[in-house]
Amino acid sequence: MRICRFELDGAARFGVLDGDTVIDLSTGAFSDMTAFISGGAAALGEARRMMYDAAETDRHELKRIHLLEPVVPSTVLCAGSNYHAHNAEKLNTPLSGKEPEFFVKTSDCVIGPGESIICDPKLTQKLDLETELAVVIGKPGRHIPVHQALDHVFGYTVANDATARDRQVRRTPEGFTWYELGRGKAFDTSLPLGPVIVTVDELPDPQALTLRTRINGELRQQTSTADMIWSCAELIHFFSVNFTLKPGMVILTGTPAGTAWSTDKELGGNWSPAPGLTPATRYCLPGDVVESEIVEIGVLHNSVVGPDT
């Protein structure tokens, strides 16, 4: 099932994508998307019933509505340096590849499909964009065992982890490198999400998905989620040691090779040509168009704009 949020008559609603139409679920037993996610199997059963019984007034043509971010997460838990190929293309810290790089984004970072990523020169001169698989938590838990972790997943969506590289990667004159993941990762419009959440019954294996990034039509990233160092289940376990995971929380699972960082020698980039990929010649600027795709989920479209646009 493909679940989405959308705007209708100025109000945010949620529904299920059925071909070229969206069936409005907001008229059912669940007040909003987070309540629906919390509803688990009962909510999905209600959604299937509503799909079967949907009146024409509950169906909206996709081309006539505006899709929103599919979930407004209370917390976004993020894992950096989680693909073997991405680790090989950049300067690393002593812990890279040995444990997940843990950082947090907030709901203030989140935007939806078609919305603009702001490139603010007062914040960064090196705006990088990274497609990632995002895990949407459906069942609460703490200290979740790896073998039970996927039971806590509602579904998956596409994320774009916008990053201010010159805020993230810091180096001393002596060559010591450290990451400042706060200012480098969390800022306005730094987390596009969407276009839909695909429920786990349609994606039973999150380690067998195809991920791509195109910027201005150039293919920058393409890989399988099988290249993750830590699987989705292992990341759920890892983050649940710190937090009680709750319905509507989102986990970002890292990005593969092909970032602009890989060609930035100043920040330790080490581009290794991959068949079919176009290396970045610069970081992102206003006017750029990015397509973040996970083939089994969909394409998340966003553009880059200046701060005064």
Image (spheres, helix red, strand yellow):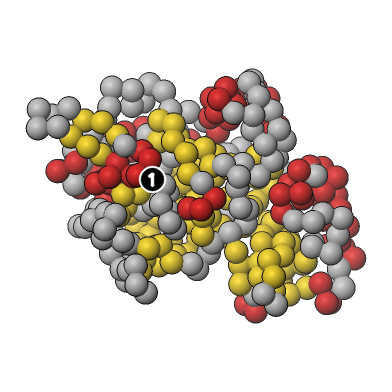
User: Which residue occupies 85% across, 49% down?
Assistant: 45
Q: Residue 305 at x, y = what percent?
A: 35, 69
152 up-or-down from 212: above or below: above
Q: In this view, does 75 lie to the left or right of 212?
A: right
Picture quarter containing residue 95?
top left
Q: What residue type is labelled 1?
A: Lys
- At mark 1, the secondary structure is helix
Residue found 72% across the figure and 54% down from its top: 33
Q: Mark 1 points at which residue?
A: 185
In the image, taking residue 173 as reference, residue 166 lies left or right, namely: right
Q: Can residue 60 be seen in this view?
A: yes
Tell me if 197 is positioned left or right of 300 in this view.
right
x and y, in percent, of residue 294 in the image = 51, 52
Where, by quadrant of the figure, is residue 79 drawn? top left
**Does residue 203 appear anywhere in the picture?**
no
Q: Quadrant of the C terminus?
A: bottom left
**Residue 308 spot, x, y in % from top left:** 34, 72
User: How many marks do you count on the picture?
Assistant: 1
Q: Is residue 66 above or below residue 194?
A: below
- Identified at 83% across, 77% down, the residue is 57
Label 1, residues with CA under 10 Å away: few <14, some 14-19, many ≥20: many
Q: Which residue is drawn at 61% across and 52% down?
A: 72
Where 257 falls versus 102 (above or below)? Answer: below
